[in-house]
C-alpha cells in the first residue's frame, strides 16, 4: 500500500524547505505551524518573481515558524523576523509566470535583508500572498475542476514517488554520476510504495476524506542542478532525464513528478507514514 513518506512546505518560494510530520491540506496547498506553502515570494522592484534560477543562494535562506513570527536565517546574516499577524501592508502588484497578482509588500527592512543576503545588485522586495486574493489554476489539465494556489508555479501540490527518484539515481550511478537527494526536486508530497513513475498514471490518491488528484506532469527547469545544502550549481540531471522522460504532451518537456490539485477533503490533516489508496487512471 502506498504511504506518505515526506511532507514538505516552502514558506518562501524557492528558499529552503521545511519538513513537517503533519500538515493541513488546503485547496491552495499545505499549511503547518501557522504558515502556508509558498506564502511569501521575492520579486524585483518592478514586481517580477525571482527563484533559484536567478539566485541559487536562495537555497540557503531558511524560513522557520517561531511563535508569532517567521524567522528567516541565512549564512553571515542576523535573523530576520517577519510577523505572521496581518497589518495594513501596502499592495504591490507582482507577476508570476502569466499571472498578475495583488500581493502585500513586507517592507523596507525585509527588502534590505534579502538584497544583502543574496548580494543582489538591484534592490529586491519580499511580498506575501494576500488573504483576499484568489489565484485560480488553469483548468486545461484538471478536467474542468476548479482549483487555486498561492505563489507555487501553477498548482497547489507537487507529488513525487520515492521509487521514481530511486530509478533516476540508478541511471545516474550507471553514468558515473552521484545520486541526488529528493530535495533537488522540491516536492510537497513524497509517496513510498508506488512503482517508479506510477504517479504519472494515478487518477487520485486518497486517505479518509482527502483526495489528491495528479493533473499535470511537472516539466523541469535547471533548479535540480543546484545543491540545496550549498546553493552551488553542479551537474544537471536533465541530461539523463531527457533520455527517457521527455513528454510529448508538453512539447517534449522533461518531466519528473506530478502537479496535483485537492479534489476533496480540504481541511483534512495529512501525516507522515499515513497509508494512501491509489486509484490508477487506466
Image: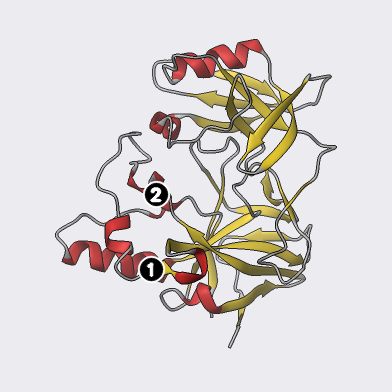
Q: Is residue 115 above or below residue 160?
A: above
Total tally of numbered discs in the picture = 2
Asked if the residues shown at circle 1 and circle 2 are in contact, with their CB atoms under 8 angstroms apart, the answer is: no
- Other residues around mark 2 within 10 Å, as few (<14) / some (14–19) / many (≥20): some
* Nearer to me, 219 or 228: 219
Asked if residue 34 shows in the view, the reply is no
- Left or right of 11 in this view: 265: right
Q: Compare residues 199 and 135 and report the one nearer the observer.
A: 135
Residue at mark 1 to residue at mark 2: CA–CA distance? 17 Å
Q: Is residue 147 left or right of residue 50?
A: right
Q: Which mark is residue 245?
A: 1
Residue 239: image quadrant is: bottom left
Q: Is residue 85 visible?
A: yes
Residue drawn 44% across and 73% down? 197
In the image, residue 15 lies at what x, y percent? 50, 35
The crowding category of the residue bearing disc 1, from other C-alpha atoms within 10 Å (few below 14, some 14 to 19, many at least 20), is some
Compared to 147, does 129 lie above or below? above
Q: Position of residue 210 (x, y in %)?
A: 73, 68
Q: Is residue 106 above or below residue 226?
A: above
Q: Which residue: 26% across, 42% down?
A: 234
Furthest-front residue in view?
251
Rendering coords of residue 33 (x, y %): 68, 41
Q: Spot the residue most to the left.
A: 176
- Report which residue position mark 2 lands on: 184
Single out the mark in the foreground, 1 or 2.
1
| Residue 233 spot, x, y in % from top left | 30, 38
Amino acid at each position: 500500500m502506498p504511504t506518505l513518506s515526506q511532507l514538505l512546505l516552502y514558506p518562501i518560494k524557492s528558499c529552503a524547505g521545511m519538513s513537517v510530520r503533519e500538515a493541513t491540506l488546503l485547496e491552495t496547498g499545505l499549511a503547518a505551524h501557522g504558515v502556508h506553502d509558498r506564502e511569501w515570494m521575492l520579486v524585483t522592484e518592478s514586481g517580477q518573481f525571482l527563484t533559484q534560477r536567478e539566485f541559487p543562494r536562495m537555497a540557503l535562506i531558511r524560513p522557520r515558524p517561531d511563535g508569532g513570527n517567521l524567522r528567516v536565517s541565512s549564512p553571515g546574516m542576523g535573523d530576520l523576523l517577519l510577523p505572521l499577524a496581518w497589518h495594513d501592508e501596502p499592495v504591490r502588484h507582482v507577476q508570476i509566470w502569466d499571472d498578475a497578482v495583488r500581493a502585500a509588500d513586507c517592507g523596507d527592512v525585509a527588502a534590505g535583508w534579502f538584497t544583502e543576503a543574496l548580494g543582489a545588485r538591484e534592490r529586491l522586495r519580499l511580498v506575501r500572498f494576500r488573504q483576499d486574493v484568489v489565484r485560480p489554476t488553469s483548468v486545461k489539465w484538471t478536467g474542468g475542476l476548479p482549483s487555486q494556489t498561492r505563489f507555487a508555479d501553477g498548482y497547489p501540490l507537487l507529488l513525487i514517488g520515492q521509487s521514481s527518484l530511486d530509478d533516476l539515481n540508478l541511471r545516474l550511478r550507471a553514468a558515473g554520476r552521484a545520486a541526488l537527494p529528493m530535495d533537488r526536486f522540491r516536492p510537497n508530497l513524497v509517496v513510498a510504495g508506488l512503482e517508479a513513475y506510477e504517479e504519472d498514471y494515478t487518477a487520485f490518491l486518497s486517505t479518509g476524506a482527502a483526495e489528491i488528484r495528479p493533473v499535470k506532469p511537472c516539466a523541469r527547469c535547471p533548479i535540480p542542478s543546484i545543491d540545496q545544502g550549498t546553493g552551488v550549481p553542479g551537474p544537471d540531471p536533465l541530461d539523463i532525464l531527457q533520455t527517457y522522460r521527455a513528454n510529448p504532451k508538453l512539447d517534449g518537456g522533461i518531466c519528473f513528478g506530478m502537479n496535483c490539485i485537492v479534489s476533496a477533503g480540504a481541511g483534512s490533516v495529512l501525516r507522515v507514514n499515513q497509508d494512501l489508496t491509489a486509484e490508477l487512471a487506466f
